[in-house]
Amino acid sequence: MIALRAAAFALPVLLVTSQPAVAGQQKTSCEPRNLAALASWSGVWIAADKETGIDGRSDTNWDLAGLSAPWNDDGWARMRTMMRLSTNPRFKQEGWGFPMMMNSYAEFSFVISPGETAIISQYRDIRHVYTDGRKHMEEDDRWPTNWGDSVGCWKGDTLTVDTVSVKFDPSYNPLAPPLSEDAHFVEHLRLVSPDRIEGDITIVDPAYLTGPWTLPLAYKRAGKLDRLIHDTFENDRTVAEGDTLTIAAPHDEAFQPTPPPPEVKLSTAELDRLTGTYAFDGAPLKLIVQRREGRLYFEVPPALTSFLPMYAQTPESFIAIDGAKVRFTVDGGGNVTGFDGSGPDGTPMKGKRVATTAQR
Amino acid sequence: MIRKIGFAAALAVVSAGAQAHHSGAMFDSTQTVTLAGTVREFQFTNPHCYIQLVVKNAQGQDEEWSLEMAAPMHLLRLGWHKSSLKPGERINVKIHPLRDGSKGGQVEQASTADGKPIGSPA
């Protein structure tokens, strides 16, 4: 037990001292010395043993989810919850987050620039690894996120990434190691051949691990894919039914055009008598009405400075494209003096005509 | 047209999470059903692609199956494209069926009517 504790203490020290880009060495150059030499990192990569078949399944051991971690009793208690959540028949996942995005079946790319290496996953997970020598955000000012705060350092063809403030967020992805928000991650990645990157990740989390947890990482080129295409939920037909999920029937395109309301045809003279500038009662807004061809258009500066169509219902009543209803008011002499009606959300509105021309 | 093959599957801990986006428990991975039918639509969409396959049942009536596949990115890696299947095309598929008995499943293999595999690694 004593030896184990000693080892657990020694390794975090080793991790910290082996991170050239980490706190305390601000602006030490961690940028790639020869960016062109890293060109082979471009392209699309995938974890070497995690790729799916056409079914979308990957029958692999999800070791980075925590199966091989040296949990303490509290950690195992969190694993019990994680396992319950991730084996729930109604489990759904919004992304992978870190660290799982580095060990999933989601294809990803490295985008290397002098001051930053971005790691971008098919699942829209993005890690910004700053290599310009900056420190982590100050501890008092940072907060845990699904991807953490990463700084990195290039040494030759090896990228070392130091990550803190990672959030275990089962609402985003329950299939992840339930570490504390104080966990500290260090990755080493190296291009070992044109089509393979290897390295390791070491995680230190005194709250839930009995010692450092190190796993190998390996990536291979994702076939001959020449681009990354991100996932969305545009056609998510996986729906809950009872205590499980099923496939919903195919549905028509959800977005459908809304035809304009029927409108009455007004003469040019009938439309022109309504054009001009109106001042809203109780609001610093103007309603400016113009005629274009055979229809009125309106804008409401400064809130709305684009002219939108209004559809005539009577010689004085109109429905705007956004659903607002406008009725122009006329005095006993037949002069148009103002308007009343309701906005798109039904809020009553009213105003007085202040000019027969557009006055912004 | 519909043939069931049962097989034993070893279920690892958290294997249900190995299915993209959602639990794989909705599919019965101990059963494989072979379908021969006509493609009505190939939805090359996220988060999953789907084959809408019209299959004749034992009574000779047409039934439409909704067959889930991986996301487009994964299918592209495996040599599938948006144009890999066209409406009216006859294909054979092996699927893990939905547990709830609905006409649907998860595509494990797909081939043309004359038995050629569809897709080839990119």
Image (cartoon, coloured by chain):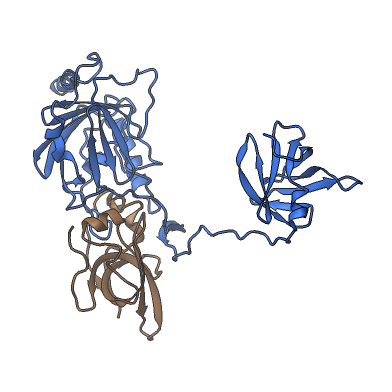
Chain colours: A blue, B brown
- x then y, percent, for residue B28: 31, 64
Between residue A316 and residue A109, name the one nearer to us.
A316
- x then y, percent, for residue A204: 23, 26
Taking A92 as reference, is A69 above or below it?
Answer: above
- x then y, percent, for residue A185: 24, 28
Q: Number of marks in the image?
A: 0
Taking A61 as reference, is A116 above or below it?
Answer: above
Between residue A143 and residue A86, name the one nearer to us.
A143
Residue at (25% x, 60% y) in the render:
A54
Residue at (21% x, 60% y) in the render:
B79
Taking B61 as reference, is A173 above or below it?
Answer: above
Asked where in the image residue A279 lies, by quadrant, the reply is top right
Q: Residue furthest bottom?
A: B59
Between residue A181 and residue B20, name the one nearer to us.
B20
**Left or right of A160: which side holds A333?**
right
**Left or right of A287: which side holds A91?**
left
Asked where in the image residue A98 lies, by quadrant, the reply is top left
- The image quadrant where one finds the C terminus of chain A is top right
